Amino acid sequence: MEMLHLVPVIDEGLGNSTYLLDIGRGRALVVDPERDLRQVRAEALRLGLSIAYAAETHLHADFISGVRELEETERATVLAPDVGPRGFAHTVLNDGDNLDLGNITLQALATPGHSPEHLSYLLLDHGRIAGVFTGGSLMVGTAGRTDLVSPEMTVPLARAQYHSLHRLMELPNDTPVWPTHGAGSFCSAAAGGERMTTIGRERATNPLLQVAGEDAFVDALLGSLGTFPDYFLRLGEVNRRGPVVLGTTPPLPALSVDRVMSLREQGAQIVDARQPAHFAAGHIPGSLSIALRPVFATWLGWLAEPDRLVIIVRNPDQDPADIVWAAAQVGFDTLAGELDGGFPAWKNSAAAATGSLIEARSMVSGAEASATVLDVRQASEYAAGHVAAAWNIELGDLAGRLGEVPTGPLVVMCGHSERAMSAASILERGGRTAVAVLNGGAADWAREAGRSLETGR
């Protein structure tokens, strides 16, 4: 068996891996591509490959799929499980179907659980097992969540996931496992940073495969799940119908201060992509702080309203292509534009707001020592270690729970400061004042206070 040329293209922000496989004769197979295909296309170009096939393991909820884009722009053949009529050309694969790609054969394995139609793809090289693409089924140390379809389907899909994982365990121990979802994905509960594994390793170490019986598996899987962004509930249908083909990088038109003011009066929302320190130094009143970083797409999809125009504020050193592609990944196909000249243009023409970014010592012995601490991390992060007496409201829930936030001065914190500044901007928009953001995280407070963090929920 020849050495496979498989290139994982990892999106650290969404926590997913797209796989580019050389299948011979200058052709490539791509598995679970995202809509932002810049890296995938760069790798294919580097290897001198044209993308002939684009396979999906399931109907994705966490990102807009790139298979429609590849079908239209690269004339790639789309391979996908059957989830009812799709709005674009594709080849349906069912359990046991084989697709001859030359020396390599792709065999579909039904592995429902993460979604009802989920397929894994067994890769056969000259008839021998070379590996398996497991999508949102078997992952490194965990398995895909089963609560994205409907509440009444969550337990039945968890039971299906149990049987799917045990079906995969019938493969040889040395079989490479190539999951799509991994650490950083809200489809996964994985904590480590590894993206690939083997059947034998998962058989020996995956906690979900160590429990005794189906009922215990269901309890363990559902007990490991945290919250997920609400945009997961709408992207699946977009992917089934077929998203708009963008082709090239979407534009980000320059908007004058007057035009921004006019659009804001008409209901547009302003998303400030600058880093927390810049936002604290000055920002457009009522704007939403979402710092441009790998997880920008997730928080834009979670916090911005999908039915309102989005205006971007950025610094000159921030690449507009990174912003518009991240937005497109979660369904914001066309942004209204960006503030021409950035925040300095606004500051020279209109009233601005400021924020407060503080160090841990100010929480311990400074002006904010008596303030209520609001921790906006995920519940699992909070439980792992938090400041004594800190309140926990996850950032994704904050806008709907402003009435629960204690009155008086607040210090908002997360792991570093980005999510906390997003929270502070939501609080400001809700009319709160005396809100400071910790520049750092719980560990910084613990060092400054000389105290241990509390654990538990």
Image: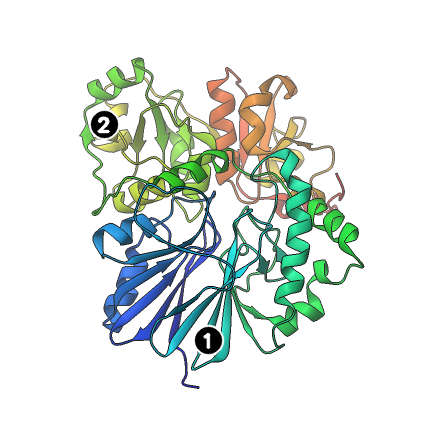
Considering only vertical position in the picture, is 352 above or below 396? above
| Disc 2 crowd, CA 10 A, few/some/many (<14, 14-19, 20+) | few
Q: Quadrant of residue 245?
A: top left
Residue beneath the point at 37% across and 51% down = 34
The location of residue 36, given as percent across then percent down, is 32, 50
Residue 118 in sight? yes
Measuring from the top left, give residue 403's x and y in whole percent: 61, 16
**Secondary structure found at label 2:** helix
Q: Earlier in the sequence, mark 2 or mark 1?
A: 1
Q: Amino acid at mark 1?
A: Leu
Q: Which residue is mark 1?
A: 124
Is 310 positioned to the left or the right of 1 in the image? left
Q: Residue at x 23, y 50 (%)?
A: 72
Residue 199 vs 64, above or below: the answer is below
Name the residue carrying label 2: 345
Query: Residue 408 vs residue 14: left or right?
Result: right
Front residue (pair 308, 415): 308
In this view, the residue in front, 339 or 16, is 16
Which percent across, then down, holds residue 324? 29, 41
Q: Residue at x 23, y 57 (%)?
A: 74
**Mark 2 residue type:** Ala
Examine the image and state in which quarter residue 298 appears. Answer: top left
**The N terminus sits in image quarter:** bottom left
Element under label 1? Answer: strand
Label 1 crowd (10 A; few <14 / some 14-19 / many >=20): many
The residue located at (45%, 27%) in the rendering is 355
Cα distance, mark 2 to mark 1? 59 Å
Which residue, as the protein is rendered here, is positioned at the far bottom?
1
